[in-house]
Every structure is written in structure tokens, then in C-alpha cells.
């Protein structure tokens, strides 16, 4: 192969990897001038009745359910029914004697998020125009549904809330929370403001029931990653996923290495499985002149943080022998990424424990590399993250509310 061809391929590869480092900073500088040009259309963007089916999914573990149900029952907006889908769970200890709570125990193992969701939808006690998805380890802010209503009232059909850390009791939990802050800031707040869509996070998200069924009812999605398929389907139909930063769900962060490895191996597996959807969105976006579809397609193609950081480091070192001047560009790009990471933390009123935990990033990345090596059989081992529940954590989070349901 001609040396010029090899050099071109090497430069193209570096560009594909390197843009991930500077993309967040470009979004940040674009943000002040960005204008989200959301437009209603007659096909989808109709304002629906604010009646919610709240779907809470549990797989094998139920010990955290009482607190999440209690937080949902304490919503300031009360037009909803809660559906607990207890897949392969012992429900004998669950005594929710409340007219707004329906406990469903599938006869056979579902072992799938979407199957659990549709199991609940088919058993709605009334046709709820909207649904929201909550994990069994979550806690929900009292204003969660009220904040969701703001965006649905504007005609949005899909809304992602903010997943805040429920616990910061270990270095792993703090670094997991830092990752979420980064993604919520750039893939939520800034991406949405730039005219694209917020990425979905698996829970703390709401949809019109019609849209959810339209996108997923005829698809067979196994393992992790249903949210990746769902978001691609929504954006494919030229709809925007809104980001509601005040619709807060507290999510349990990973606290132990084996928990981290199992969870991340499923997530990495789902990225390799579904990242190709980004190509289709970019193609559609160029055809439709859609900023929403092009930007979102680029985000779907982006590898997990630790992968493109490792690849970037490899490129920087390799260029010491190939094209030494390029190493300076890589150092500048890595510096831009580090700057963008701290910008996200500074804009999010980050807890001091998260800053202190940043020294543990190398170890955190090591366990994610282990996750990469184990990803092929990730969904065979488990379909849900094991939760190490501590009631004092839930009590601590709930004590942060005042009587009006606002954060103290």
C-alpha cells in the first residue's frame, strides 16, 4: 500500500477519535448563541392529558421498592397510577395498601426492560396518555411530574429528567456520579439547547404512551440498551427529546468493583451493538437538513469515555515516532477535554467528595477495561445491576426535601 494512502488513513483515524475530545467544548461555546427551534407539527406534537402510568421495574430484588414507591406517592402532582413490575421477585413482603399502587408479577420470566414495560402497559387500569419509567433503586423528587408537565404542555412527546446521585459513599460512587454530571451537562442540557435531543438515561424519562408504543412495540430488544434504540427511533421521526433539569431522580451509584464491572460490561456491549444507529441518523439529518438528527447521530457514534481516552493516549504516543508534531495537537485536545470535564462539574454545583475522588480515575478506568474484556457475555450473567441497599441513604436523601417538596 502506498505510503500516502497509509498516512491518509492514519490521519482520518485520528480525526474520528480526536473530535470526541473537543466536541463538548464546541457545544459549550455554541451554547450562549444556541436557539432551540422547536416546532409543533400536526402528526406528533400534540399536548396530551397529564395522566401518568408510572412503571417501576424490579428484577429479583425488591428491598428498595418501599422507598421509591413512597417517594412517588409524595409527588406534588397526583394524577397517576404506579405499576410495579416484579419480575422473578418474591412479593410476599410487599404490602402496598394504596389505590394508586398496582403490583404485577409476571407468570414467566421476562428478563427484559421493554417486556416489563409492555407487560405494565397492557395492564393499565385506564388509558394513561403519558408514561414514565423509574428504576427500583431510584428516589423521585416531589416535583418530578410537575416539571415533566412543563415540557409536555409545550408539545414535547419525550422528556429526559436529571439523574442525580443517591449515594456518594465510596470513590466508585463518586466517580460514577461525576460521569453522570458530565453526560447530563453536555448530552442533556447543551445538546438540547443546541437544537438536538437529550440522550436517554434508562430511567427518569417520560413519553406519551402512543410514541413509546409506536417506537418499540414491534421490536424484540434483549439485554441492555433499549434506551439507545428508543432514542434513535424518536429522533428518526424528527422529534426532539427534551431535557428537564429540574425533574430529578436520585439514582443509586455503583459502590463496589464487581458491581461496576458487571454494569459497565452490559453498557459497553450495548454501545457496540447499537452505535451503528448513528450512521443512519446522520444520513437522515443531511437529507432533511436536520441539526437534531446530525448532532444526535454523532453522539450515538461516540465510544464510552474511557475507550476514546485510551485511544487518544495511544495516538499521542504513537505520533512521537510517526508525526511528532501531531503529539502537540493531541495534548491540546486532551487538555480541551479535561477543561470541558471540569466546566461540567463547576456548572453543576458538584459535591466536594466528587472532586476528592477524581484521584481514583485510573483505578476506575482499569475496572472499565475489565468490563470491556467481559462484555461479550455480559447479558448472559445478569440483566440488572445488583443493588447494595442501605436505608440510611434513602433517609438522608429524603431529608433534603422541605415541606413544599423543594431541595433544601
Image: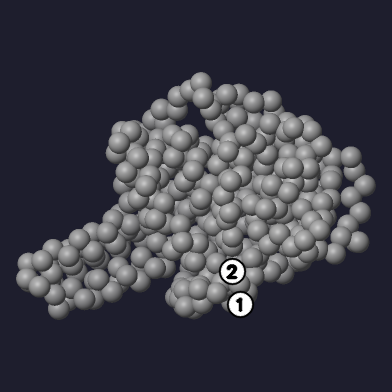
SS for dot 1: helix
Tell me if residue 250 comes above or below residue 90 in the rendering. Answer: above
Looking at the image, residue 108 sits to the left or right of residue 256; the answer is right
Q: What x and y, as percent, mark residue 242?
A: 52, 37
Q: CA distance from mark 1 to mark 2?
A: 15 Å
Q: Residue at x 64, y 26 (%)?
A: 48
Q: Nearer the viewer, residue 221 or 254?
A: 221
Q: What x and y, as percent, mark residue 14?
A: 23, 64
SS for dot 2: helix
Residue 381's disc is none
Q: Nearer the viewer, residue 170 or 3?
A: 3
Q: Nearer the viewer, residue 252 or 81?
A: 81
Looking at the image, residue 172 sits to the left or right of residue 50; the answer is left
Tell me if residue 283 comes above or below residue 266 in the rendering. Answer: above
Q: Residue at x 87, y 60 (%)?
A: 91
Is residue 99 something one can see in this rendering? yes
Tell me if residue 157 comes above or below residue 23 in the rendering. Answer: above
Q: Residue at x 39, y 50 (%)?
A: 278
Q: Which residue position is annotated with label 2?
A: 379
Q: Which residue position is annotated with label 1?
A: 258
Q: What x and y, as percent, mark residue 314?
A: 28, 74
Q: Residue furthest top?
A: 42
Instruction: Tell me the quarter of the picture where residue 170 sits.
Output: bottom right
Looking at the image, residue 100 sits to the left or right of residue 292; the answer is right
Which numbered disc flags the more N-terminal residue, 1 or 2? Answer: 1
Instruction: Tell me the quarter of the picture where residue 283 sits.
Output: top left
Q: Nearer the viewer, residue 30 or 235?
A: 235
Is residue 139 something one can see in this rendering? no
Amino acid at each position: 500500500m502506498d505510503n500516502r494512502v497509509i498516512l491518509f488513513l492514519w490521519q482520518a483515524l485520528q480525526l474520528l477519535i480526536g473530535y470526541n475530545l473537543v466536541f463538548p467544548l464546541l457545544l459549550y461555546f455554541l451554547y450562549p448563541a444556541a436557539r432551540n427551534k422547536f416546532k409543533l407539527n400536526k402528526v406528533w406534537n400534540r399536548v396530551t392529558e397529564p395522566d401518568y402510568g408510572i412503571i417501576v421495574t424490579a428484577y429479583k430484588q425488591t428491598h428498595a421498592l418501599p422507598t421509591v414507591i413512597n417517594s412517588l406517592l409524595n409527588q406534588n402532582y397526583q394524577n397517576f397510577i404506579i405499576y410495579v413490575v416484579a419480575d422473578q421477585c418474591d412479593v410476599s413482603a410487599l404490602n402496598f395498601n394504596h389505590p394508586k399502587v398496582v403490583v404485577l408479577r409476571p407468570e414467566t420470566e421476562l428478563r427484559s426492560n421493554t417486556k416489563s414495560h409492555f407487560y405494565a402497559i397492557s395492564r393499565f387500569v385506564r388509558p394513561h396518555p403519558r408514561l414514565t419509567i423509574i428504576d427500583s433503586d431510584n428516589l423521585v423528587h416531589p416535583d418530578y411530574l410537575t416539571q415533566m408537565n412543563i415540557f409536555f404542555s409545550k408539545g414535547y412527546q419525550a422528556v429526559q429528567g436529571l439523574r442525580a446521585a443517591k449515594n456518594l459513599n465510596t470513590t466508585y460512587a463518586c466517580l460514577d456520579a461525576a460521569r453522570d454530571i458530565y453526560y447530563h451537562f453536555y448530552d442533556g442540557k447543551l445538546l438540547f439547547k443546541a437544537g438536538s435531543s437529550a440522550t436517554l438515561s434508562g430511567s427518569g424519562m417520560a413519553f406519551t404512551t402512543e410514541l413509546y408504543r409506536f417506537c418499540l412495540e414491534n421490536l424484540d430488544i434483549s439485554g441492555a440498551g433499549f434506551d439507545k434504540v428508543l432514542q434513535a427511533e424518536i429522533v428518526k421521526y424528527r422529534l426532539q427529546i427534551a431535557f428537564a433539569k429540574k425533574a430529578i431522580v436520585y439514582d443509586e451509584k455503583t459502590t463496589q468493583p464487581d458491581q461496576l464491572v458487571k454494569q459497565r460490561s452490559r453498557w459497553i456491549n450495548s454501545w457496540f451493538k447499537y452505535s451503528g444507529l448513528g450512521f443512519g441518523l446522520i444520513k437522515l439529518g443531511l437529507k432533511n437538513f436536520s441539526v437534531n438528527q446530525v448532532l444526535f447521530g454523532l453522539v450515538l457514534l461516540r465510544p464510552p469515555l474511557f475507550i476514546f481516552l485510551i485511544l487518544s493516549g495511544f495516538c499521542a504516543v504513537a505520533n512521537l515516532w510517526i508525526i511528532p508534531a501531531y503529539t502537540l495537537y493531541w495534548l491540546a485536545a486532551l487538555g480541551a477535554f479535561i477543561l470541558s470535564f471540569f466546566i461540567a462539574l463547576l456548572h453543576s454545583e458538584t459535591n466536594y467528595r466528587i472532586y476528592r475522588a477524581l484521584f481514583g480515575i485510573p483505578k476506575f478506568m482499569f475496572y472499565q477495561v475489565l468490563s470491556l474484556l467481559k462484555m461479550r457475555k455480559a447479558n448472559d450473567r445478569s440483566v440488572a445491576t445488583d443493588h447494595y441497599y442501605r436505608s440510611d441513604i434513602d433517609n438522608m436523601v429524603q431529608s433534603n426535601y422541605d415541606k413544599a417538596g423543594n431541595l433544601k
